[in-house]
Image (cartoon, rainbow, N blue to C red):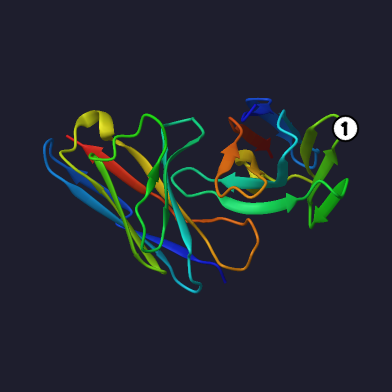
Amino acid sequence: QQQVKQSPQSLIVQKGGIPIINCAYENTAFDYFPWYQQFPGKGPALLIAIRPDVSEKKEGRFTISFNKSAKQFSLHIMDSQPGDSATYFCAATLQGAQKLVFGQGTRLTINP
Amino acid sequence: GAVVSQHPSWVICKSGTSVKIECRSLDFQATTMFWYRQFPKQSLMLMATSNEGSKATYEQGVEKDKFLINHASLTLSTLTVTSAHPEDSSFYICSARGDRGNYEQYFGPGTRLTVT
């Protein structure tokens, strides 16, 4: 019930395409859902986050879609660029708790 | 804003020695800091959570006597890997959460530990 399941494990998209990464959770007590981007040898960086009271959030080329009834959320990257090639992690936080529960990660490659 | 640093960025040590890794929040006060471990091509594994001035809370399976965590101030936490062995070789990442009432964690750049 504490898990966040992320898919796909890896994804290859041509430049300009829209990669979509999906996450699903079981625990309805989760109330904060961030996405992190990690480049090799670096720490994760917060990209964008959403709370369950909204269905979509956009920040620049990054969009989170949130489906509360299905307990799923996804990351869309518009007009993807080779520089977006990285590993992306979704996560969730239990209400009132401190720690994040991470998905398994998606290795994204954007081909030029 | 919300910058977290780690030192060193990489370290090589011999089996049996101890290594200390520092994590600092540079422009905010971190009431809570977290230590993660990450193996190649895997997700982050939370090792422990520490609140300033109190003992760290370790995740199940993490040896508290081997991975000593100290959160002595609102801007500094340290992780000491004692009597390191080759299987302790990994990427160690800290994160910090401030006192703004939100859930955001800000991650450090990580420390690559290699035990020979």
Residue under the point 62% across and 30% down: A2
**Direction from residue A68 to residue B46 in the image, left or right:** left
Which residue is the extreme one toward the bottom?
B27
From the top left corner, tell me how far across and down residue A67 is, in percent.
Answer: 86, 36
Residue under the point 55% across and 67% down: B2
Residue under the point 59% across and 38% down: A101
Vertical comparison of B3 with A21: above or below: below
- The residue nearer to you, when weighing A2 against A18, is A2
Q: Name the quarter where the C terminus of chain B is drawn.
A: top left
Label 1: which secondary element: loop
Label 1 environment density (alpha carbons within 10 Å; few <14, some 14–19, many ≥20): few
Vertical comparison of A27 with B25: above or below: above
Q: Which residue is mark 1?
A: A69
**Direction from residue A18 to residue A106 in the image, left or right:** left
- The residue nearer to you, when weighing B24 against A26, is A26
Amino acid of disc 1:
Ser
Circle 1 marks a residue in which chain? Answer: A
Q: Name the quarter where the N terminus of chain B is drawn.
A: bottom right
Q: Which quadrant of the view contains residue A77? A: top right
